[in-house]
Image (cartoon, grey):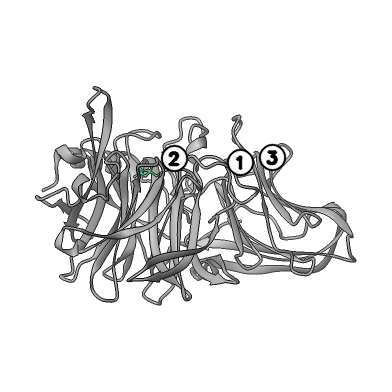
Amino acid sequence: MTSETLQKARDFEAQYGPHIPDAERPAFHATPTIGWMNDPNGFSMYRGECHLFYQYHPYSNEWGPMHWGHLKTRDFLRWERLPAALAPDEEYDASGCFSGGAAELPDGRQLLMYTGVRRAHNEEGFIQDVQTQCVAIGDGVDYEKWGGNPVLDGKDLPEGGSTIDFRDPKVWQDKDGTFYAVIGNRTEDGSGAILLYRGIEDFKGELVRVLDRCHNQYGRMWECPDFFPLDGKQIILTSPQDMTPIGLEFHAGNGTLCLMGSYDPEKGFTRERVQAIDYGLDFYAPQTLEAPDGRRIMIAWMQNWATVGAKPFHCRWFGQMTLPRELSVKNGRLYQAPVRELERCRGPAVVHRHVLVCGETNLPGVQGRVLDMTVTVRPISQGSYRWFRLHVAKDGQHDTVIRYRPDQSTLKIDRCRSGLPHDIVHTRSFLVTPRGGEIELRVVLDRFSVEVFVNGGEAAASAVIYTRQEADAITFEADGQALIDVEKYSLVFDGGKEG
Ligand code: FRU
């Protein structure tokens, strides 16, 4: 049965969503049907298709009582819109259906597991959240919330665990057939922990263990965890709140964290390495799925909570997802590359090799706003340039700049002049590994974003831009003399040519 609250959301999006012209949206990044989007939810395969749900408030371009919006795709690039899947229509989720996951049940139905939020007065009379884990079951379009909800609540927490911050279940079926979930929680020291539960297929959960704990070292509350094996390592992804910066690796505020290690069912998770997931301005709450061909693919909300106030005037959609990325582990690091399906959308190549850049220059055929371009930069002799700048989305007033400094091995992304005239963080720098003085930058542009993949994916940096679309020049600039190779492809979707 579709509740009145869900039906209202479905009617609203069906009526007003189609009013937003395609040209006002990204060409291949997922956006809400209408209104507000935050975290990806339930990013998973179901009956051979990839489903993506998302935190959704259809009625405004701001966060509000959370629904789940719904999209699906066959190629991670073209998104089919489905009606909203969940609405806050029960006592236990009256204040929102927060983030969660999805999985295909053995009987062919689709399981959604999410955080139900309700508000209650605490002993001092203060209003605070009560967060529990709930399930809904459906056929890929319509979902019924389980009559026995919630599946997990305060009694299922380890000692000291907070019921105010107990959220974001990511559910999956393991090789042994069991359904597991990882869930974020705040512990007695005020900081985060990741809990592992099993037995979700029976709409209950038995706490297996605390997988890892923050101990106030990397932020405070850990949101939106994920947990999976990758290339012989075990990976935890999580999104910490209230991070204190650490060098150029972690910035202040809402960050992203990859914990790499090993997992032993007896002993648990052993953390070996820690790194940020994305070094740009806009990236949060990533989720992964395992594709039928074995690839581990990640998508994230391409936005930062600290900057959500900066949006185009009267926009009818706000919030978009990153390009889905293939993950791997190389040299002890998490690597990311755009899904290979992107290559099938490339138009003819524009290639320039061994171009000497000295001052600022443009190159024939290299411009556009929807494209996939790889630029390799090297010195003509040791120390022949002090910095190299790649300018994209450029006209007389605007540009978005990616700057490399070989002496510091830093890359900086700067979107000060990218159509967001708000006093917010616009630049971020991070360390990269020079390969004998050479650096490779793969830049994927869509109408409202730039994503940079460095040296085959050792680091990625994402940023939202709202530069007017006519600003489509690309230039290359060096302080000194640099040699570059450029390979640029316009990206073409559904017959329409772009870039
Ligand atoms: C992360 C988050 C989640 C929560 C959701 C609410 O961005 O805060 O922890 O479930 O957003 O919309």
Residue at left offset 28%, top offset 59%: 102
Residue type at mark 1 is Thr
- Mark 2 — residue? 318
Please tell me which of labels 1 and 3 falls first in the chain.
Answer: 3
Label of residue 135 in the image: none
- Mark 3 — residue? 398
Q: Secondary structure at mark 1?
A: loop
What count of labels does the image hold? 3
Residues packed near mark 2 inside 10 Å, few (<14), some (14 to 19) or many (20 plus): many
Name the spot of residue 479 as percent of width and height, x first. Answer: 86, 51
Answer left or right for 146 relative to 347.
left
Whether residue 232 is situated above or below residue 61 in the rendered picture: below
Residue type at mark 2 is Phe
Residues packed near mark 3 inside 10 Å, few (<14), some (14 to 19) or many (20 plus): many
**Mark 1 vs 3: CB contact within 8 A:** yes
Whether residue 293 is situated above or below residue 8 in the rendered picture: below
Residue at left offset 35%, top offset 44%: 186
- Mark 1 — residue? 467
- Place residue 9 in its image quadrant: top left
